Image: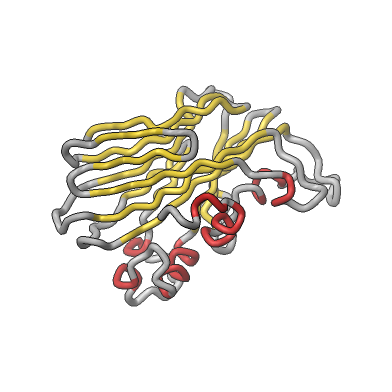
Amino acid sequence: MKKYSLEKVTCLLGILEISIFSNDSNIKIEKDIEHTRIISENYSVTVYTFSVLEDWLWEELKIHSSKGWMFYITKKTDHPIEMNILIELINPSEKLSSGPAYGQGLMAIEISDRQNKLHIGTEGDDALFWRAEEDDFMPQRLFEGFDYSGNEKYTFTDLIEYGFSTQIPHLNSSEKIYFHYIYADDLIRPSKDYPNEEDYSTWVAVDFPKKYLETKIRKIANDV
């Protein structure tokens, strides 16, 4: 598969890159201020970017920086085509540590050194199932038999050392699917509520479902 780098962002721990990999043919990427469009013979993808705003968080929560990417994917044919989305910290320092930081409806990874902390989040399998039930950019057939058991059959996104890799499942013609990824970083500091624990603002800042993001980012409503 060929790699197409969509964006690189400088954060407190280095460079975060988001890319797609695909064996599709004649891929064209068009960018403007509001979104990126990825067009090929078999797929149409629109990617919206945004930042987590202060009024999305509780008053006592603060972050240094953030960015998110919302992928709206439509299959144009029935042809079996491979496509992956990769978000990861590139050229990481040897001083970094990483590990899972999951929550209800949330799949997240925490990456840190002695001074700074970064979270990357995406919707967990249960959140995808809820969207499938509502036919909200998630085909219902992909979650037949889902029982919250953690079966890999329903897992499209894998945790890697410093990020996530999502394998887009086979879609039939006209089927649609959606994934998003959010990062937030900050200095490591004590929690205001629990001084013996670390502040968790960056974790909260990556925990937003699709519907919430769409209510906050009005420009999407009439465009997908």
Residue at position x 49%, y 34% from top?
33
For this orientation, the residue located farthest to the left is 79
- Please determine whether, in this image, residue 13 is positioned above or below residue 138: above
Left/right of residue 14 with respect to residue 180 in the rendered view: right
Where residue 88 sits, quadrant-wise, is top left
> In the depicted view, which residue is nearer to us: 47 or 181?
47
- For the C terminus, the quadrant is bottom left
Locate the N terminus by quadrant. top left
Relative image position of residue 110 (x, y in whole percent) = 58, 42
Left or right of 110 on screen, residue 30: left
Q: Residue at x 44, y 40 (%)?
A: 35
Q: From what the image shows, is residue 213 above or below residue 154? A: above
Residue 218 at x, y percent in the picture: 56, 53
Please report the residue visible at 47 percent of the width from the left and 44 percent of the height from the top: 48
Instruction: Name the residue at 41% across, 48% down.
Output: 71
The reply, left or right, for residue 189 in relation to residue 204 is: right
Image: 207 above or below 165: below
Q: Is residue 25 left or right of residue 113?
A: left
Residue 176 sits in quarter: bottom left
Residue 80 vs residue 53, the one in the foreground: 53
Viewer-closest of 134 and 144:
134
- Describe the colour scheme in one phrase: secondary structure
Q: Position of residue 118 (x, y in %)?
A: 61, 37
Give percent across and percent down for residue 133: 42, 75
* Tally of marks: 0
